[in-house]
Image (tube, rainbow, N blue to C red):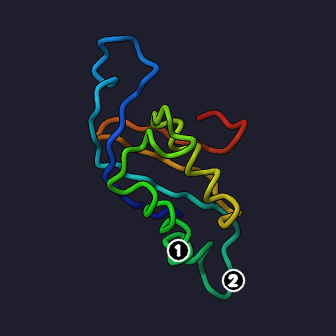
Amino acid sequence: MHREFSFEAAHRLPNLPQGHKCTRLHGHSYRVTVHVAGDLDPTLGWVQDFGDLKAAWKPLEDQLDHYYLNEIPGLENPTSEVLAEWIWSRLQPSLPQLCAITVQETCTSGCTFRGPGANS
């Protein structure tokens, strides 16, 4: 199961070669999909309450929405991949059934992180 969230933020990618367009300050309408997996609860009929996902996401939304990502500790080079791993590390303690985080910068570009050591 999954739930999708969104936020608006600015960033730049400082480690790219001089002249690359992504070294300049720009913004995105990010979409983040939080995926959890597990056994279906026979009484409730679900893997996890969607409200639990929303509650776990809220503190991250408060940190990310309408901010300059490069100024957030751990996001000094905020690629989609780095952002997905950063989100995972903050959600996983409260969502032990977390199985993937998908971050989309645009409608055609994004990545999926499946946890430390997994192929993304």
- Residue 116 location, x and y as percent? 70, 40
Percent coordinates x, y for residue 5 in the rendering: 40, 61
Q: Which mark is residue 65?
A: none
Q: Is residue 69 left or right of residue 44?
A: left
The residue under label 2 is 42
Name the spot of residue 38 as percent of width and height, x first. Answer: 68, 65
* Residue sitting at the far top: 18
Q: Earlier in the sequence, mark 1 or mark 2?
A: 2
What residue is shown with label 1? 55
Q: Mark 1 belongs to which amino acid?
A: Ala
Q: Position of residue 32 (x, y in %)?
A: 43, 53
Query: Is the residue marked by circle 1 packed among few (<14), some (14-19), or many (20+) residues within 10 Å?
Result: few
Figure quadrant of residue 65: bottom left
Task: Identify whether 33 is placed above or below 108.
Answer: below
What whole-number distance in Å separates the C-alpha atoms at marks 1 and 2?
23 Å
| Residue at left offset 49%, top offset 31% | 77
Which is closer to the viewer, label 1 or label 2? Answer: 1
Side (left or right) of 38 relative to 102: right
Q: Amino acid at mark 2?
A: Pro
Query: Which secondary structure lies at badge 2?
Result: loop
Q: Secondary structure at mark 1?
A: helix
Residue at image position (58%, 50%) is 100
- From the image, which quarter does the N terminus lie in? bottom right
Q: At 56% from the left edge and 78% from the top edge, which residue is drawn?
A: 49
86 left or right of 79 in image:
right
User: Badge 2: few (under 14), some or many (20 or more) residues near its Cα, within 10 Å?
Assistant: few
Which residue appears farthest toward the front when viewing the image?
A: 71
Closer to the camera in the image, 55 or 41: 55
Q: How many marks?
A: 2
